[in-house]
Image (tube, grey):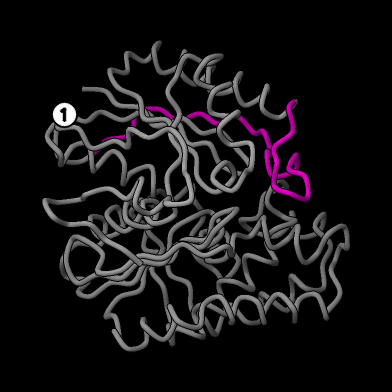
Amino acid sequence: MRLGVVDVGSNTVRLVIADGDGWVPLPVHTAKRRLRLAEHVDSDGRLADEAVERLVDAVQAAREEAHRWDVKQTFAFATAILRDAPNRQEILEAVNAGAEAPLRILSGHTEAELTFLAARRWMGWRAGPLILLDIGGGSLEVAFGRSGLPDFAASLPLGAGRLTREYFGKHDPPARRAIKALRRTVRHELRDVAARVRWEAPSTAVATSRTFQQLARLCGAAPGRDGPFVPRRLVRSDLRPVVKRLMQLPAAERAHLPGISAARSRQSLAGAVVAHTTMKLMAIDTVTISPWALREGILLRHLEAGGSAWWPELSSVNDNEEEATTLHLAAGGRVSG
């Protein structure tokens, strides 16, 4: 059976198509449309009407492409970029009507849980107690677990794109005082979660997301063209000089560094600050980079569910977001932060 995932993120709408006849989703096709939705968010987090129209067209195009690839079931979701938007319900109604594709907004806890699932499956049981870190455009997801399910999962408003807008504005490169203020915020937001992680003392630390991938590449990891099976790591002591280097460069010059694309060059500094501060607070020296993340977690969850219903039925996130959309990854297996 061929499955599809449509991922609406801060920068792109990405389609991943995989064959799901076994226990492992085997990728057969990917495509992305760069919308840069985060650049069309006002001070209240509201997504502009023009950007919504472009989103509808992008989801519709992804749906049509999935149909051409004979996809039997497509899971379309959005995370922080829509989760935090005051007009999220209007956006969902526009996409669901215009693109004729049901779009779900995943809660931060669900995002962390599914990403942990993917990282655990990639690393295997030999990894032991595992901590997962994922820096997105709007949020940072953290999850810890000793088994296939996380014992706790948290989503924090520490995404690289969000913090770039809030702390750096149009300053390029930003002032040192802005970077210090950003670090203080990261330390404050992570205080309780970091204390829990240090207490758990995980055996293995795993990171996903483009932010961690590009930072690992900057620190000497193999390029993406070498394939997903090449081991990649990010060492905290190597990351510190990279942060200092990024602080000194405008976005246009960062885009010439290994692994950093022009689209992500502006938010690369905030992502590096979050990554380094998080690893330091949690006493993590090294993270292993997992090529499997949220999209693969969704595919794995579907395969392991054996066709039973599991995908969130609610189309919006309300004030009780955790209660509304946290998934049962196993019978009685609800995870909270």
Q: Find residue 98 and report its image quarter.
A: top right
Q: Quadrant of the C terminus?
A: bottom left
Q: Position of residue 265 (x, y in %)?
A: 72, 55
Q: Residue at x 68, y 51 (%)?
A: 264
Relative vertical location of residue 281 with respect to residue 221 in this rendering, above or below? below
* 92 sits left or right of 163 in the view: left
Q: Does the magenta-highlighted stretch encompass residue 39?
A: yes
Label 1 is placed on what type of residue? Asp
> As rendered, which of 206 and 184 lies closer to the eye?
184
Is residue 172 something one can see in this rendering?
yes
Q: Position of residue 12 (x, y in %)?
A: 59, 37
Q: Position of residue 107 (x, y in %)?
A: 43, 49
Q: Residue at x 54, y 55 (%)?
A: 136
Residue under label 1, please give it: 21
Q: Residue at x 26, y 61 (%)?
A: 335
- Secondary structure of residue under mark 1: loop
Residue range highlighted in magenta: 25-49
> As rendered, which of 99 and 315 lies closer to the eye?
315
> As rendered, which of 74 and 155 lies closer to the eye?
155
Q: Does the magenta-highlighted stretch encompass residue 315?
A: no
Q: Is the residue marked by circle 1 packed among few (<14), some (14-19), or many (20+) residues within 10 Å?
A: few
Q: Residue furthest front?
A: 319
* 239 sits left or right of 267 in the view: left
> As rendered, which of 91 and 36 lies closer to the eye?
91
Q: Position of residue 191 (x, y in %)?
A: 50, 83
Q: Quadrant of the N terminus?
A: top left
